[in-house]
Amino acid sequence: MSTCTHACAGGTTMRWVSPKLDQCLDHTERLIGIRPPVEKGQYPQILLAASTTYFFGSVLLMANVRFGASILLMALTVTSLVMNNFWDYSHDPLQQQAEAAHFIKNIGIAGGLIYYLSTSEPFKASQRHPKHVASPQITAANPTS
């Protein structure tokens, strides 16, 4: 018996994610000829791994570490292609429009991450804790230092 009874049994999130992951695996099999060895019981772990990746990428980005932006950019690219595949919804125009809106939103976020990566400087330890420099007025007033 699996420990993920609610998610595997059809929790709200898994009911939405499961068909998307099935489509992704089907597309992968058509492209490379081999189906990735992923069972439906592993879908909650995939969702947890994606959520954890987004969380740690965001924390690193908030700490001004460029690697966080790289992690988010890679995760966002994969997630957008798998979860917001609007090109597969030609039979349902409303769903296609909703997925396209999310996909375009993700492109905008990816553009912001690329801009951040291209304009920010790599983290240097000296930037975090600059050496204390005494001001000239304090040095002149206190000749013993």
Image (cartoon, grey):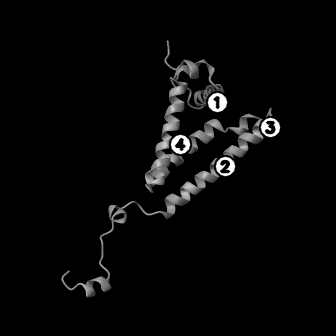
Circles 4 and 3 in contact, beta carbons < 8 Å: no
Residue sitting at 67 percent across and 49 percent down? 105
User: Of marks 4 and 1, which one's residue comes earlier in the chain?
Assistant: 1
Q: Residue furthest front?
A: 141
| Quadrant where the C terminus is found in the figure | bottom left
Which residue is the site of mark 4? 75
Which residue is the site of mark 2? 105
User: Of marks 2 and 4, which one's residue comes earlier in the chain?
Assistant: 4
User: Of marks 3 and 1, which one's residue comes earlier in the chain?
Assistant: 1
Q: Amino acid at mark 1?
A: Lys
Q: Nearer the viewer, residue 27 or 144?
A: 144
Q: Is residue 86 above or below residue 11?
A: below
Which of the labelled discs sits on residue 94, or is there none?
3
Residue 92 horizontal/vertical position (percent): 80, 33
Q: Gap in Å between the C-alphas at discs 4 and 1?
A: 16 Å
Q: Amino acid at mark 3?
A: Leu
User: Of marks 2 and 1, which one's residue comes earlier in the chain?
Assistant: 1
Q: Residue furthest left?
A: 144
Q: Within 10 angstroms of label 1, few (less than 14), some, or many (20 or more) residues?
A: some
Which residue is the site of mark 1? 20
In the rendered structure, the answer to whether residue 97 lies left or right of residue 109 reads right
Q: Nearer the viewer, residue 47 or 140?
A: 140
Circles 3 and 1 in contact, beta carbons < 8 Å: no
The quarter of the picture where residue 89 lies is top right
User: Of marks 2 and 3, which one's residue comes earlier in the chain?
Assistant: 3
Q: Is residue 82 above or below residue 125?
A: above
**Could you say whether the residue bearing mark 1 is in a helix, strand or loop?**
helix
Closer to the eye: label 2 or 1: 2
